């Protein structure tokens, strides 16, 4: 165990634990994003002690020489004293030179940096608001061709940074930037090498830069770009990319839409599914992947299966991909009934023991929902629900999963969330906050992964782009209005809180799922 001295206080770091994990476990808040040494948002400065070599991997030599390191990958073997970074070492200002809407929720933002910035196509920079909020954005611009730095920003539901960039940061205003970072770039090592690029959403940004750089440098191999979105209005730069394909015979562009019928010239499918069906032999190819983390994970595996060498696959997703893979594997133990949205899990006595028979779980949920009700992204989803009632419901639900005891009487996740429009990004955001709370309450990493695996198994029940009706006896009901039914299992009245027994006649709101006993029975 090593001691970490930070801002006058000392914190313990367990064996095998990163400094970031130790800080989160003990309630110390420092900026972070990807957790795997890519984005460099968590950068800190060592003022005493010896740093492990891997903690400085990927940093500029000038920063490493000043003892900067990445807490998310730093697992110290001796005591270390650290301090926050100095602004003059990391950040410099840029002026907003332009802002343009490219699609319904996607904007192009052009920045003019105050200092000369040498970057490569496909890299990313970190933006910082005046209040310290920081996010990573890939560069779509090409050095030597574009004067301004070009970013593609997607408006996120209640997104702290994206909405501020789009709505409040005006042309002519200034913002702090740091970078460039990342190594998902075009390489000139083999100008005849074929290239496959697959992106979703604003994952197109770095891919556009890579394509333009390759073509401008005289790349002779075939270059195939597949860009996907769930809906047509999520695609952008379609005309520009088609014009580029017309001018460059070796460049091929395929726009894909997965959830809507599309006109001629578009493919109705998932971008990565089509790309790897068409290009099933990628030996010797260079592959670039960007966008939705689940797509990046799946496409990485498909690229390796098709023969691409790992060193030829560039995929700098700002998520912990290994964690997602583990969660999906672990989640396989839960079996779903597609008609009811139910999943049956084998009891996990070891997990329940790690949670100290509910004591730790109660602390995690209390910590989590305290933060949720103060969070600008998540709190709107819980309007009209008390924090304590929510904690009690989720506690009962998770206890039933871990112990096998029949004690939960409420809706399963699909029906409980059927009216909420929840995108993958919000699901991921909630998951990251839950992970912080688990670590802060001292739950060991293997058990965190078990818990997250269960939550991940409900993603398909919760994530959606429009409300759907509650499922009752396999029948999907209308989204609005009230219905009446006889309970097959016990429940709680959402008005008076009375325990309802199986066989009772109740009235319920079709969208909210709120149940009213015969005594309350009100709209």
Image (tube, rainbow, N blue to C red):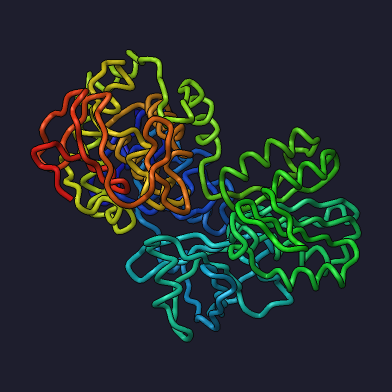
Q: Position of residue 250 (x, y in %)?
A: 89, 61
Q: Is residue 77 visible?
A: no
Q: Is residue 129 visible?
A: yes
Q: Against 216, is 499 above or below? A: above
Q: Position of residue 85 (x, y in %)?
A: 40, 59
Q: Residue at x 20, y 35 (%)?
A: 506
The quadrant holding residue 297 is top right
Q: Residue at x 46, y 32 (%)?
A: 457
Q: Position of residue 417 (x, y in %)?
A: 35, 43
Q: Residue at x 37, y 62 (%)?
A: 158
Q: Residue furthest bottom?
A: 172
Left or right side of 325 for 191: right
Nearer to me, 188 or 463: 463
The quadrant holding residue 407 is top left
Looking at the rendering, in which quadrant would you find the N terminus?
top left
Left or right side of 151 for 485: left
Q: Position of residue 285 (x, y in %)?
A: 83, 45
Left or right side of 23 for 114: right
């Amino acid at each position: 165990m090593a001691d970490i001295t930070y801002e006058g206080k000392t914190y313990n770091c367990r064996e095998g634990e990163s400094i970031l994990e130790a800080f989160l476990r003990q309630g110390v808040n420092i900026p972070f994003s990807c957790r795997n040494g890519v984005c460099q948002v968590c950068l800190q400065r060592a003022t005493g002690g010896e740093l492990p070599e891997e903690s400085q991997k990927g940093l500029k030599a000038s920063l490493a020489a000043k003892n900067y390191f990445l807490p998310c990958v730093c697992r110290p073997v001796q005591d270390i004293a650290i301090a926050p970074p100095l602004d003059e070492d990391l950040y410099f200002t840029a002026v907003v030179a332009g802002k343009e809407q490219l699609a319904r929720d996607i904007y192009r933002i052009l920045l003019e940096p105050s200092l000369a910035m040498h970057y490569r196509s496909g890299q990313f920079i970190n933006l910082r608001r005046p209040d310290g909020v920081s996010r990573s954005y890939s560069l779509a611009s090409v050095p030597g061709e574009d004067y301004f730095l070009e970013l593609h920003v997607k408006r996120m539901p209640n997104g702290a940074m994206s909405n501020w960039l789009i709505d409040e940061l005006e042309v002519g205003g200034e913002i702090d930037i740091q970078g460039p970072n990342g190594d998902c770039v075009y390489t000139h090592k083999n100008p005849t090498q074929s290239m496959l690029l697959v992106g979703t959403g604003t994952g197109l940004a770095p891919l556009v830069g890579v394509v333009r750089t390759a073509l401008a440098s005289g790349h002779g191999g075939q270059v195939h770009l597949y860009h996907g979105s769930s809906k047509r209005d999520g695609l952008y730069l379609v005309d520009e990319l088609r014009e580029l394909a017309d001018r460059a015979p070796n460049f091929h562009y395929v726009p894909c839409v997965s959830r809507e019928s599309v006109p001629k010239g578009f493919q109705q499918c998932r971008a990565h599914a089509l790309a790897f069906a068409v290009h099933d032999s990628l030996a010797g190819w260079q592959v670039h992947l960007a966008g939705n983390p689940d797509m990046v994970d799946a496409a990485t595996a498909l690229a390796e299966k098709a023969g691409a060498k790992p060193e030829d696959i560039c995929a700098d997703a700002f998520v912990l991909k290994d964690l997602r893979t583990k969660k999906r594997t672990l989640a396989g133990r839960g079996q779903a009934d597609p008609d009811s949205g139910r999943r049956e899990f084998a009891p996990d006595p070891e997990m329940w023991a790690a949670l100290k028979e509910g004591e730790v779980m109660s602390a995690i949920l209390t910590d989590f929902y305290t933060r949720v009700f103060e969070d600008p992204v998540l709190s709107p989803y819980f309007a009209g629900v008390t924090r304590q009632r929510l904690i009690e419901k989720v506690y009962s639900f998770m206890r039933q999963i871990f112990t096998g005891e029949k004690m939960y009487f409420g809706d399963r996740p699909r029906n409980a969330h059927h009216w909420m429009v929840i995108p993958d990004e919000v699901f991921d955001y909630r998951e990251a906050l839950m992970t912080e709370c688990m670590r802060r309450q001292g739950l060991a990493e293997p058990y965190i992964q078990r818990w997250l695996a269960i939550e991940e198994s409900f993603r398909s029940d919760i994530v959606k782009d429009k409300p759907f009706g509650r499922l009752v006896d396999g029948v999907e009901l209308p989204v609005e209005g009230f219905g009446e039914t006889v309970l097959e299992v016990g429940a709680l009245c959402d008005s008076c809180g009375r325990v309802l027994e199986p066989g009772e006649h109740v009235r319920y709101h079709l969208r909210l799922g709120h149940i009213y006993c015969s005594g309350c029975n009100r709209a």
